[in-house]
RNA sequence: GCCGGCAUAGCUCAGGGGCUAGAGCAGCUGACUUGUAAUCAGCAGGUCGUCGGUUCGAAUCCGACUGCCGGCUCCA
């Protein structure tokens, strides 16, 4: 708050400005120049976005964003969000407003209590009303207000949802209001300076959304949109959405003949030969890594007495997500997880501490009933397999075992080119089993394993599984989207439920610790992500067809066939396109199928026992000896290279 | 599960209370014999998602169901 003390702001050019504590970023901008003050949208202090009107009370690295800064986007979208609410209120004054979005990195949204769903026509009307409001170019004003004043204000406006929301703000927190024109909303900011700085808006879609995210509560009507400082940026954004659609695995999968879906088994993929090839190649890869690291594969039943699921606790917690069958008047459940079956193998015989760690891997098919509306392509299915494994070890071995799992996982992601990796340590959730001492120890073990190996991670407080903390692995795909893949979870609870024990050095029984580990996660989901990451252009080792032989005319079919045979006997997955079509036609088709290598053969090649090599990158490598290309493809596949 | 949308040929889509439901691509047949992203011609292909209702008549209007899509919620 304004005081006699001063603070020091370090500007991007390295210069330092000394200003009174409580000076606003807008005042700082004015001090630098009127032009900058006019164009300023927002600011940041030590990387934290700050509103132009929020008094600064500490020193730090200071930057101002103008309409031209990409960083201004969050400010602009947040302001467009208020303009959206304003527009809806102007069109339908009786509508109650709820709240906007937390994350404005891409979109904005607002929820309304509206008697029906918004239609496409409504959106058009709202959008043009928003443009009118933007043209008014109102200034966004920030106002600190007491809880009582705020409650009174919103009650007087008939905004009962807002009054409810007010109650969600923790005691003692400064309550701020942002106004533009006659519109006022409870808001933390930050906002742009003026509405007119938002140059391009688009409303994207509508949907229902539960008030406060409560499934048992009221459903409101939500509108999503996006906004930018220029029409060009908006166009680029929409273009990116289009590009993302083109690599959507639900589109590419059928196009590349990888998989299909059928009403007879909703949300359960049918992998065609090419898709199954990739599916199995992924599993083979993990199998190889398992073998190299002392994990032993087991095969366990699909359908087990429901009794087992009572023991494991899954029946109580996840009954609604399980499939059941009754045979011989006996109740069975289709397995949704492998862990209980692994516990049964572990307890099949007396175990010594000398046997530990025991590492069981399992690619068993799992079935989980996902509620309708929750399923999507390969990423959320009802029938799937995980690259699952469970390690049974002594408490002392936990750190080493966790580290082993982490290092295998990192190696695997590298193979796929998932270079950007975020590791999260998820700690005890509110609903959990076991004592606090147990959790203290488990969380400490995981953290120690990561820190011991110098691995950077973030803590995701409260997001652990109910039976133990976990390390989650998030990757970023080729177009920057984040996906959670692998997980390493500590479990002290299942060994307890199953009464697992090993005989220790002291001759007494001890409880083993269980570590759940998946690297790809669900193989189905991983394949979906991989399709989008690669846009269907798989690395040579995963390409169902690695090379297609293209004779330029029927006259060269014999040579083409001989080429294919040579490739095949050299373990290259080769296809011969001997249709009577022009070369361009066949190239186009192979290209659309993203076949890594097109091998053109005509008179010249036949005479010299070569093939004209055209990788799917489109370059022309010219005529190469057949043996060379066989060797090249074989080498790329064997090394699981991503090169062509 | 909730809010909303969609469902016509293998695919992308047009049509629309009425008489024989269309196009392009893909498929098949034939001609062409092809040199780095689509040769030409012909043929075939449909219970207009399923069930029910309204109607003289429904692919078209209404309802239910199923599946899919965008969100919400959930995800051991």
Image (cartoon, rainbow, N blue to C red):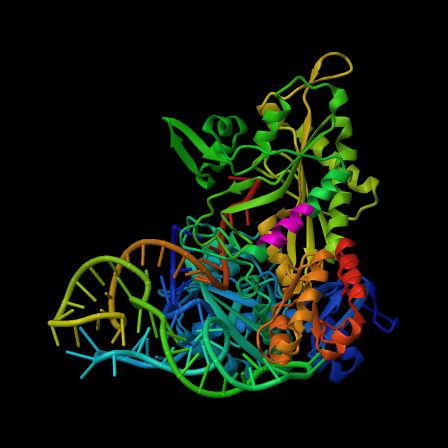
Please say if A637 is above or below A345: below
Q: Residue at x 81, y 63 (%)?
A: A60
Q: Nearer the viewer, residue A613 or A97?
A: A613
| Residue A409 pos. (x, y %) | 73, 46
Kindly indicate the quadrant of the structure image that contains residue B38. bottom right
| Residue A47 pos. (x, y %) | 76, 63
Horizontally, is A532 left or right of A290 in the view?
left
Q: Can residue A280 be found in the magenta stretch?
A: yes
| Residue A582 pos. (x, y %) | 61, 80
Q: Residue at x 80, y 64 (%)?
A: A627
Horizontally, is B9 left or right of A51 in the view?
left
Kindly indicate the quadrant of the structure image that contains residue A234. bottom right
Please say if A325 is above or below A59: above
Which SS does the magenta portion mostly show? helix
Give the residue at the far top of this rendering: A507
Horizontally, is A466 left or right of A319 in the view?
right
Q: If the image is split into quadrants, where does the C terminus of chain A sit?
A: bottom right
Asked if residue A132 can be seen in this view, the reply is: yes
Q: Nearer the viewer, residue A450 or A71?
A: A450
Q: Which residues are magenta?
A: A276-284
Q: Nearer the viewer, residue A510 or A526?
A: A526
Q: Residue at x 71, y 56 (%)?
A: A569
Q: If the image is split into quadrants, where does the N terminus of chain A sit?
A: bottom right
Q: Nearer the viewer, residue A273 or A510?
A: A273
């Amino acid at each position: 708050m304004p005081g006699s003390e001063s603070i020091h702001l370090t500007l991007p050019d390295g210069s330092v400005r000394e200003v009174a504590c409580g000076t606003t970023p807008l005042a700082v901008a004015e001090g630098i120049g009127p032009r900058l003050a006019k164009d300023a949208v927002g600011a940041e202090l030590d990387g934290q976005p700050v509103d132009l009107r929020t008094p600064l009370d500490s020193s730090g690295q200071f930057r101002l964003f103008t309409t031209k800064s990409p960083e201004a986007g969050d400010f602009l979208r947040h302001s467009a969000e208020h303009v959206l609410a304003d527009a809806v209120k102007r069109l339908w004054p009786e509508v109650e407003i709820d709240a906007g979005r937390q994350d404005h990195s891409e979109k904005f949204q607002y929820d309304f209590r509206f008697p029906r769903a918004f239609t496409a026509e409504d959106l058009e009307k709202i959008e043009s009303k928003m443009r009118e409001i933007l043209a008014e170019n109102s200034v966004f004003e920030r106002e600190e207000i007491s809880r009582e004043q705020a409650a009174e204000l919103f009650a007087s406006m008939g905004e009962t949802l807002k009054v409810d929301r007010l109650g969600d703000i923790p005691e003692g927190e400064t309550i701020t209001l942002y106004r533009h024109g006659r519109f006022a909303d409870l808001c933390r900011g930050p906002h742009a300076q003026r509405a007119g700085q938002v140059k391009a808006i688009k409303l994207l879609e509508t949907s229902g959304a539960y008030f406060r995210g409560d499934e048992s509560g009221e459903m409101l009507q939500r509108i999503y949109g996006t906004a930018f400082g220029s029409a060009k940026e908006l166009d680029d954004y929409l273009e990116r959405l289009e590009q993302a659609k083109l690599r959507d695995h639900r589109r590419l999968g059928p196009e590349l003949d990888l998989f299909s879906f059928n009403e007879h088994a909703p949300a359960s993929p049918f992998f065609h030969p090419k898709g199954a090839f990739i599916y199995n190649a992924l599993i083979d890869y993990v199998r190889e890594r398992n073998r190299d690291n002392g994990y032993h594969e087991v095969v366990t039943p699909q359908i087990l007495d429901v009794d087992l699921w009572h023991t494991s606790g899954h029946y109580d917690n996840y009954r609604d997500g399980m499939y059941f069958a009754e045979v011989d008047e006996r109740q069975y459940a289709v397995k949704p997880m492998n862990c209980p079956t692994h516990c049964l193998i572990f307890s099949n015989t007396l175990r010594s501490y000398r046997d530990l760690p025991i590492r069981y891997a399992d690619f068993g098919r799992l079935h989980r009933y996902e509620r309708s509306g929750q399923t999507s392509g390969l990423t959320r299915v009802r029938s799937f397999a995980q690259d699952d494994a469970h390690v049974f070890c002594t408490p002392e071995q936990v750190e080493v075992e966790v580290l082993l799992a982490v290092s295998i996982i990192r190696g695997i992601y590298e193979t796929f080119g998932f270079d950007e990796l975020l590791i999260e340590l998820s700690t005890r959730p509110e609903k959990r089993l076991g004592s606090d001492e147990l959790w203290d120890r488990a969380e400490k073990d995981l953290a120690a394993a990561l820190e011991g190996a110098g691995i950077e991670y973030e803590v995701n407080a409260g997001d652990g599984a109910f039976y133990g903390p976990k390390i989650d692995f998030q990757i970023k795909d080729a177009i920057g989207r984040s996906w959670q893949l692998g997980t390493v979870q500590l479990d002290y609870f299942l060994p307890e439920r199953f009464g697992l024990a090993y005989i220790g050095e002291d001759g007494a029984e001890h409880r083993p610790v269980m570590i759940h580990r998946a690297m790809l996660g669900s193989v189905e989901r991983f394949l979906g992500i991989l399709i989008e990451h690669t846009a269907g252009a798989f690395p040579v080792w995963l390409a169902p067809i690695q090379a297609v032989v293209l004779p330029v005319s029927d006259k060269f079919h014999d040579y083409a066939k001989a080429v294919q045979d040579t490739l095949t006997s050299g373990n290259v997955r080769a296809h011969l396109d001997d249709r009577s079509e022009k070369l361009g036609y066949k190239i186009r088709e192979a290209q659309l199928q993203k076949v890594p290598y097109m091998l053109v053969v005509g008179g010249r090649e036949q005479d010299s026992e070569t093939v004209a090599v055209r990788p799917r990158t489109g370059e022309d490598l010219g005529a190469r000896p057949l043996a060379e290309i066989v060797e090249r493809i074989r080498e790329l596949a064997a090394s699981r290279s991503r090169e062509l």
